Amino acid sequence: MSQLLSLVVPCYNEEATIEIFYNEILKYEKQIDADLEFCFIDDGSRDKTLSILRQLHAKDERVHYISFSRNFGKEAGLYAGLSMAKGDYVATMDVDLQDPPSLLPKMWRMLHTEGEEIDCIATRRDTRTGEPVLRSFFAKLFYKFINAISKTNIVDGARDFRMMSRQMVDAVVADREYNRFSKGIFSWVGFHTVWLSYDNIERSAGETKWSFWNLFRYSIEGILAYTVVPLYAASVLGIIMCVLSFLALAFIFIRSCIWGNNVAGWSSLVCIITFLGGIMMLSLGIIGLYLSKIYLETKKRQIYIVREQK
Ligand code: UDP
Ligand code: MG
């Protein structure tokens, strides 16, 4: 009996791309020595995405889908897809063909190379052609920063396009955190991962759903989820400020003992007070961010809500 490969595909307002994607997969199907299963996730789309998925399901019984009650975000979509996938192997990919289906046969073969124990083939983009310059710049900066302060390695240019063994999928699904950052979770669960690189490809149709602000929030999410170094940094900064101000106090005390008191220097005083105020606000802000994550996590909210499933 041949093995089953599930394709997990989150879709948000993707009426323009779903059929292109489906037909593209059919082209490469024969090169993969497995049965296929499609797991589409309609992430609360407001266009014809759901009705296209219904049509595909009616036409091809290998097509399954979950439709969310509202937009829950790509992370929730990936989680829902991984939970519903039944395959011995599962591949996660975007519907806009930025994750080329032509790589699937190669990934499948790599996972089945005899003698090598590989659990996951992950992909990364070598180039960021076609992306706004400023966006690439900040993306690079983010990866440098997070890898400098976090123990979980987050690979620059890593896509959410990967093929995993059942064992690894089960580990990812068992991690039921609410504030999800998949790039971190995939790395955190471990297992043997091999990286494949390819050139950036622009979307087949439709538009990207990520604004610059969304990406910024996503980066903060990644930092908060995978490292508490900012909290340490705030404490260390506090200690340094205490030592400095103690030294300054000693200096002022000795100076006024020798030369008497004088009122000069109020402007520097104001500077110091505002500086300290700023540092305190910053530290409080950092603590607040972590606190908000704990708050959301303890609510144990559902990661997604299903409206229709086939
Ligand atoms: N997506 C989703 N929910 C969202 C936003 C995006 O399921 O709230 C899906 C989208 O349909 C696509 C994938 O996530 O399949 C990647 O989105 P997009 O192509 O807009 O992002 P980019 O490739 O520009 O990073
Ligand atoms: Mg895309």
Image: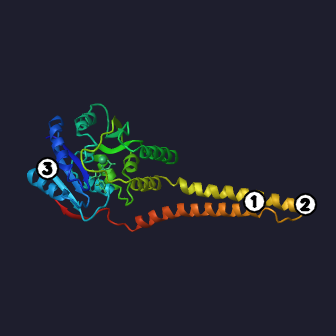
Say which label, 3 or 2, has the lower sequence index: 3
Q: Is residue 288 above or below residue 132?
A: below
Residue at point 28%, 56% (across, down): 77
Three-letter code for the amino acid on which mark 1 is drawn = Phe
Which secondary structure lies at badge 2? helix
Three-letter code for the amino acid on which mark 3 is drawn = Arg
Q: Nearer the viewer, residue 223 or 34?
A: 223
Where, by quadrant of the figure, is residue 307 drawn? bottom left
Q: How is the image coloured?
A: rainbow
Q: Is residue 257 above or below residue 156?
A: below
Which secondary structure lies at badge 1? helix
**Residue under circle 1?**
246
Where is residue 27? Give x, y as percent: 15, 38
Which secondary structure lies at badge 3? loop
Looking at the rendering, in which quadrant would you find the C terminus?
Answer: bottom left
**Residue under circle 3?**
62
Where is residue 202? Give x, y as percent: 30, 42
Q: Nearer the viewer, residue 105 or 188?
A: 105
Spatial CA span between label 3 and label 1: 71 Å
Say which label, 3 or 1, has the lower sequence index: 3
* 3 and 1 marks in contact (CB < 8 Å): no
**Residue under circle 2?**
259
Spatial CA span between label 3 and label 2: 89 Å
Residue at point 48%, 45% (across, down): 141
Where, by quadrant of the figure, is residue 24 drawn? top left
Judge the density around disc 2: few (<14), some (14-19), many (≥20) Cα neighbours within 10 Å: few
